[in-house]
Image (cartoon, grey):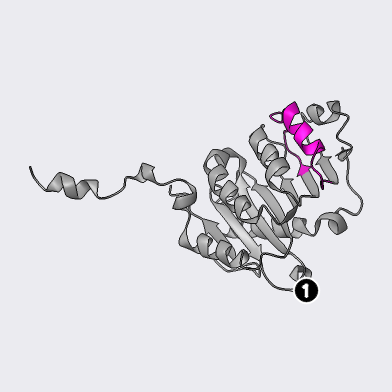
Amino acid sequence: MSSFPRIFLLFPTFSDFSRAERVSRAWREAIMEATRNETKPVWVYIIFRKNHCSGHEKMTVNISFDGPIFWKRQVAYIYCCSCHFDEHEGPLMAILEKFEQRVERVCLVDKPVDYPFLPDSLFSYMANKMPKLQFIYCRELDLEKINRGTVVELANHPNLKKVIVHLCRNYEVLEDFRNLPQLLVVKGEIMGLKAMLGDFEEEIAKSTASSSAQSSEKSSHSPVPVNNGY
């Protein structure tokens, strides 16, 4: 028998690698750096870029390490795209797993409201795997896929203080379950939003401007692109 097939079989195929295993080396190094200090609480902002933005199909992670505002916490900005969420979901969950024991706040932000791309499993994961979670903020999202069982899990979370649904649609399942006292539905603007959530609007604006200009300059938060292998 020829030795050629044996040599060929030594190499793994593309399908042997999971999405988490196919992320870039730079992303891995950034996550390792971010998780060295395992005592600081973590705030996570998951921001869905507009579909027409340049590079919207690429997932990007910005992790803040320094500056007075970050002395008491770490902040992770994760940029995804709704139309490529099936590709981004695996790497996104890998990132969240790195921080899950320290996450206090999760903000999910889109604009404008898109189709219901966020799976119920994401909210169930937050309810069951983030023991220190205190705050969930959803803006301009279609929450149709959240089921009643997940709402029960959120309601029973020992530390969850507030679930804010801001300019979202199809959130009725959250309202139907009256044992979710943490729920706050907002249809207009929120006074004091910046003080409550941090200045994520500025971060979104910077990212959008950078994407539109196709700039390669690094921001103060050192953006690291995630390579999904495509």
User: Camera-side residue: 201 or 127?
Assistant: 127
Question: Residue 148 colored magenta?
Answer: yes
Looking at the rendering, which quadrant does residue 77 occupy? bottom right
14 to the left or right of 193: left
- Residue 38 in the image: state x and y as whole percent: 67, 64
Check disc 1 and give the amino acid type.
Pro
State the SS at label 1: helix
- Residue 28 in the image: state x and y as whole percent: 51, 61
Asked if residue 111 can be seen in this view, the reply is no
- The residue tagged 1 is 68
User: Camera-side residue: 76 or 218?
Assistant: 76
180 to the left or right of 215: right
Residue for point 79% across, 59% down: 199
Question: Residue 178 colored magenta?
Answer: no
User: Camera-side residue: 76 or 79?
Assistant: 76
What residue span does the magenta drawing correspond to?
138-160
Position of the N terminus by quadrant: top left
- Residue 143 in the image: state x and y as whole percent: 73, 33
Looking at the rendering, which quadrant does residue 71 occupy? bottom right
User: Camera-side residue: 15 or 53?
Assistant: 15
- Residue 211 in the image: state x and y as whole percent: 59, 56
Name above or below for residue 147 compared with residue 86: above
Looking at the rendering, which quadrant does residue 198 occupy? bottom right
